[in-house]
Image: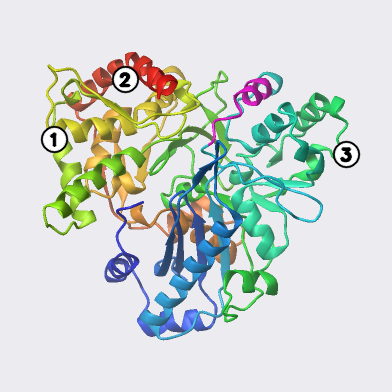
Amino acid sequence: MLHFDSFEKLIQEKEDVTMGFTTEEVKKQIEEGRTALGIELGSTRIKAVLVAEDNTPIAGGAHDWENRLENGIWTYSLDDVWNGLQDCYRDLAEDVQKQYGVELQKIGAIGFSAMMHGYMAFDEKGELLVPFRTWRNTITGQASEKLTEVFHYHIPQRWSIAHLYQAILNGEEHVSSVRFFTTLAGYVHWKLTGEKALGVGEASGMFPIDIETGDFNNKMIAQFDELVADKNFSWKLREIMPKVLTAGEAAGTLTAEGAALLDPTGKLQAGAPLCPPEGDAGTGMAATNSVARRTGNVSAGTSVFAMIVLEKELKKVYDAIDLVTTPDGSLVAMVHCNNCTSDLNAWVNIFKEFMESMGMKADMNELFGTLYRKALEGDADCGGLLAYNYFSGEHITGFEEGRPLFVRTPSDNFNLANFMRVHLFTALGALKTGLDILLKEEGVQVDEMLGHGGLFKTKGVGQRIMAAAINASVSVMETAGEGGAWGMALLASYMLHKEDGETLPAFLEKKVFAGQEGTKEAPCKEDVEGFDKFMERYAKGLAIERAAVENL
């Protein structure tokens, strides 16, 4: 996200507050390979976090990147992936050298995560058959609808199986040559270890999971094979999928080739154990201590998703609700929306450009904070203003494409506070549509919702808007800005340090979050009522968004 604090500041704050080791002790842990590393390939940033034995971040690295729309497909090239990973790791190694005066050579455990879902298909030689199709694509509506009907289980458009089946429906030539398909996290893990594996949380974004076995649902695999039997493919579905592993299990080791791929300088030693690769949803749950039942979290950045760990199955199948799992295999209801802060960031950049045109230097953290806080001065219902943040399609509201748009009538209360407020509200508009199903129709109980991601970096603002959207308290921990890379490092650390019989929730509660403080924001009645009024306008105005898509 564009307004994250620098790693140096983040790590210094953590050191001042919680770190139990001296600099010399941390240095020794690095030299002896007693650290854990998490690297996450997010939508706009690849981020690395190295943690000490007490799970405190001690160093970090980052690389900014962007997806591209090529031939109607949102994608990143393989060069983007590897150049980005190498630059991120180099940045991490430089941070270690700068802070502790040692070279990063040995790592105790490593984990990779990435944006969930999507489609990467490979032939028998391991060559990518078609460009990576990311979660952001909304081109699999026909497949999603048919598979949902066949399985009696909601299959979202962005799931890997929907992409595979849509390619079959499209008659794409590459399908007959597929010998392995996976997600971005699974691909990186495979290339670094030689193991075709996924963590169960990430796997649940490929294909439905049988909660009892912790593996892909065998009945649905058989149904899929029967569905495509007339195509006479040389493969069966199970043969081309990765194996499914649970948090804490070993998932291979870093090979010599993998070490050279990640660190071309040759300093990184092979042999580090890797934990199962996960998706950004699973790492978000770990990073917010929301893997136990009746807990939930909201990750708000380029996309936005909310996840609640369920006590039981839902009564019905809903197009707006995905069923996935925690990294340790518990059932989770997920509301995922493609669009969140991209349009908001674009408007903030307009203000940055204005400041620079006026000869002022723009500090982005200060600019974001000032504009976000201004939104709290606005009318409860945004003064009648309306906006849609649809950079891409939004399945919950039925859009395959998007057009960012801002609309008002001459009589609306158009000022800066309402302008910023409406863009914060609309960032959560589609999400609220799905969460209302869970909380109001299904009566799902949640003890605490935790927020993380760029939307929550300005203290109190994103929290208050989210609390208004769901009419429930929202907490943000001190570690909210550390995000998925830290969550991935925690999963690697769990594999490395867990005691016999120690569950992931127990590990996180006792060894990571014990004593950690956060801030809780209760919903304000006026904000809740204002958000509801905005949502009435939002629903009616979808016809305007539809017209924009059709005519622009």
Element type where label 3 sits in the image:
loop
| Residue 61, quarter of picture | bottom left
Three-letter amino acid code of the residue under disc 2: Tyr
State the mark number for residue 416.
1
Residue beneath disc 2: 538
Q: Nearer the viewer, residue 208 or 370?
A: 370
Against 90, residue 401 (above or below) is: above
Q: Residue at (49%, 68%) from the top-left corner? A: 87
State the mark number for residue 234.
3
Element type where label 2 sits in the image:
helix
Q: In the rendered structure, which disc, 1 or 3, sits on the residue that comes first in sequence?
A: 3
Magenta region, residue range: 137-148
Q: Position of residue 389 (x, y in %)?
A: 35, 32
Report the Cα–Cα distance between label 2 and label 1: 20 Å
Residue 341 visible in the shown view: no
Q: Is residue 351 left or right of residue 290?
A: left
Report the Cα–Cα distance between label 3 and label 2: 48 Å
Q: Residue at (42%, 23%) from the top-left corner? A: 549
Element type where label 1 sits in the image:
helix
Q: Is residue 196 left or right of residue 465?
A: right
Could you tell me what secondary structure mostly forms the magenta stretch?
Answer: helix
| Proximity of marks 2 and 1: CB atoms separated by less than 8 Å | no
Q: Position of residue 301 (x, y in %)?
A: 38, 44
Q: Position of residue 287 (x, y in %)?
A: 43, 52
| Residue 481 lies in the magenta stretch | no
Q: Is residue 527 left or right of residue 493?
A: left
Report the Cα–Cα distance between label 1 and label 3: 60 Å
